[in-house]
Each structure stands twice: as C-alpha cells, then as structure tokens.
Image: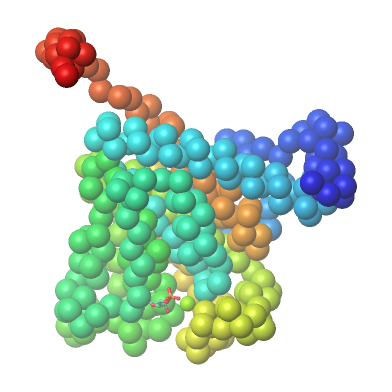
Amino acid sequence: MNNRFQTNFEYACNDRKEVLVIKQKDIDRLRVEPGKKIHLKDFNTEWDKLDKYEEAGETALKAQLNLLLAKNLTDLTKAQQLLYVDDRYSVLIVFQAMDAAGKDSTIKHVMSGVNPQGCQVYSFKKPSLEDAGHNFLWRYAKCLPERGRIGIFNRSYYEDVLVVKVHPELLQNLPEGKVNKAFWQGRYDDINAFEQHLHRNGTIILKFFLNLSKHEQKKRFLERIDKPEKNWKLTEADLAERDYWQDYMVAYEEAINATSTEWAPWYIVPADNKRVTRALVAETITSTLKSLELNYPKVSKEQADFLINAREKLVLDS
Ligand code: AMP
Ligand code: MG
C-alpha cells in the first residue's frame, strides 16, 4: 500500500467517519416511477454522491467502489444459488445504452461471481433475415431465462423502439398502413404487455439504461483509437450513430417514459464512471434478489428419514 493511497483511504474511511455506501434510497433515486414523465437531461451522467467524497482522492474512491462491488458480488453469488434452488422465479436483466457506455464491461464484472450454469448472456445485433421474417419480439422470446436462472440481454427488444425509431428504414416489411401515427405507441404497449406476461409467470425484470454523456463517449472513442489493444472496438457505425445522439436521447426518453412499469422498472444509471456504474448495477440486482426472500426448500419427513438411513449406510460402508 503506498502512502498516498493509505492516507486517502484512511481519510475516506475514518476522518469522514463515513465509508462510501450505497443505500436503498440511492437505488430508489435511479428508478423511474411508473407514470412519471422524466427528462433525461435532469439525470446526471456522473454520480452526485461522489462529490461528497471528492476530497478523499481518486485512488481512495476507486478502492471504495471496488470494495462495494466485491461485497455485492459475494451476496449476488449466494442469491443466485438460492434463486436456482428455489426454482420459482427467473430474472431478466436488460441493458441498453449508447455505444461505449460500458454494457459489456458492466456485465462482465457484475456477473463474474455467478455460477455460469445459472446465468446466460445474449447480445443482440442486427436481426437476421429469419428474425426479420417474424414479429419483432420473436427472437427475444426464444432467449428468455428458465425458472431459477438469470438471463441478461445485452441490447434487447428495446432496440426496436430505439435504433429502429431513429432509422425507420430498418423497419421490417409491414403491410401498407401499419406504420401510422399510433405505430410506436403500439410497440410500447406490446412491450408492456409482453413484460407483464413474463412477470405474471414469475419473471423478475430489471432494465438498466447506462446514462453516458456525449463528452465521455468522445473520450472513450478517442481511447479506442489511441490504445492499440482497443482499436478493434471502434467501428464506422459507432461514429455514424454518434451524429444521431440527440435523436437517440429523444427515443430513449420516450421509450423509458412509456415502459417503466411496476412489473418492469427502468433504472437510469450514471455511466461516466465505470466503477460507479458497476457498483450501482450490482447493488440494484442484489437488493432485488434479496427482497424475494428466497429459501432453501423445507426437507420433508420422507427426505429426512432417507437422509438418516443414507448416513447410517454410508458410515458402515467399506
Ligand atoms: P454492438 O452491440 O456495438 O455490437 O452493435 C450491435 C448493433 O446492432 C447496434 O448498432 C444495434 O443498434 C444493432 N441492433 C441491435 N438490435 C437491432 C434491431 N432490433 N434492429 C436493428 N439494429 C439492431
Ligand atoms: Mg458498438
């Protein structure tokens, strides 16, 4: 531990007598209340709570955020095991964001502690011809998590009211007259009904919009050019879509306002600091799973008798 780190860290932990913690109210503030109209410009892309700890120094804050994430990963591992054993709920976690907002790295870090057998990640790219031949929810419905599992959608059916709304030429072939004034509201209604159907069947749905600033995206794109090991990450499409930033913000705002429901709420997570994003996402998932009060199943009388007999037999076994 170098001196600067030690001093900063102790300052954060002791002198301020307040270790950086994420409280339920911090999570609640990210959630978009159903029926309430939000404006994205009112949501900070940085985490305001960090301001309070700024004097502690960057190194101390990084250490604190890593600690927070680590604690949540331990809890998440336990919660996932219970989810699996309990076998009543499934969990669907949706990630949406502009390019370079940190979807991939958040998924990688937050899910690093969970048993791969209980978790599946699907990344959705441009629809295939077969996908485009079906209704817009078809390809996503095939990837939903089974009971007891966590399913992660890296992009999702929301692309069909985001990128497709910004570029309507991407719309599937639809009969004349279908793309009328009510078309997008119809898609929001379809999504709400789809998610309510899943909820009624035991799926817990969490949706994260990683809220990145245009300025931070520029910084991350430049890094992808300047760091050779990141060169592969920047595509022409990324740069082209940046030109539509404002259109995307409008599409996101409309989609979030129309589809944040009791059964499938949106969380708007500050994304300009990757450690903050990971810590907040991990905390939201963990606290949601904990609130389900999952339990190991009660051992029946028959199973208890069987276990006693099995033990006796095994102990005497050569
Ligand atoms: P990436 O996640 O950066 O690899 O990029 C995937 C690309 O696929 C993004 O440009 C998305 O906008 C695009 N994409 C994902 N889903 C759809 C969809 N349903 N319709 C059109 N484009 C999509
Ligand atoms: Mg991309």
- Who is closer to the viewer here, 96 or 120? 120
Q: Quadrant of the C terminus?
A: top left
From this viewpoint, is residue 161 visible? no
* Residue drawn 57% across the image and 62% down it: 211
Q: How is the image coloured?
A: rainbow
Please give the count of numbered marks on the rendered protein: 0
- Image coordinates for residue 151, horizontal then vertical, percent: 33, 53
Question: Furthest-front residue in view?
Answer: 318
92, 72: nearer the viewer: 72
Whole-percent x and y of residue 227? 64, 80
User: Could you tell me residue 132's position as x and y percent?
Assistant: 22, 79
Residue at x 24% of width, y 18% of height: 298
In the image, residue 88 above or below residue 182: above
- Whether residue 108 is visible here, answered yes or no, is yes
Q: Is 204 positioned to the left or the right of 172 in the image?
A: right
Q: Position of residue 278 (x, y in %)?
A: 56, 53
Q: Quadrant of residue 79?
A: top left
- In-image side of 68 versus 290 (left or right): right
Q: Can you tell which quarter of the image residue 242 is in?
A: bottom right
Q: Is residue 253 above or below residue 261?
A: below
Residue at 52 percent across and 74 percent down: it is: 99
Q: Is residue 232 left or right of residue 307?
A: right
Q: Nearer the viewer, residue 313 or 279?
A: 313
Q: Residue at x 64, y 42 (%)?
A: 67
Q: Is residue 9 left or right of residue 250?
A: right
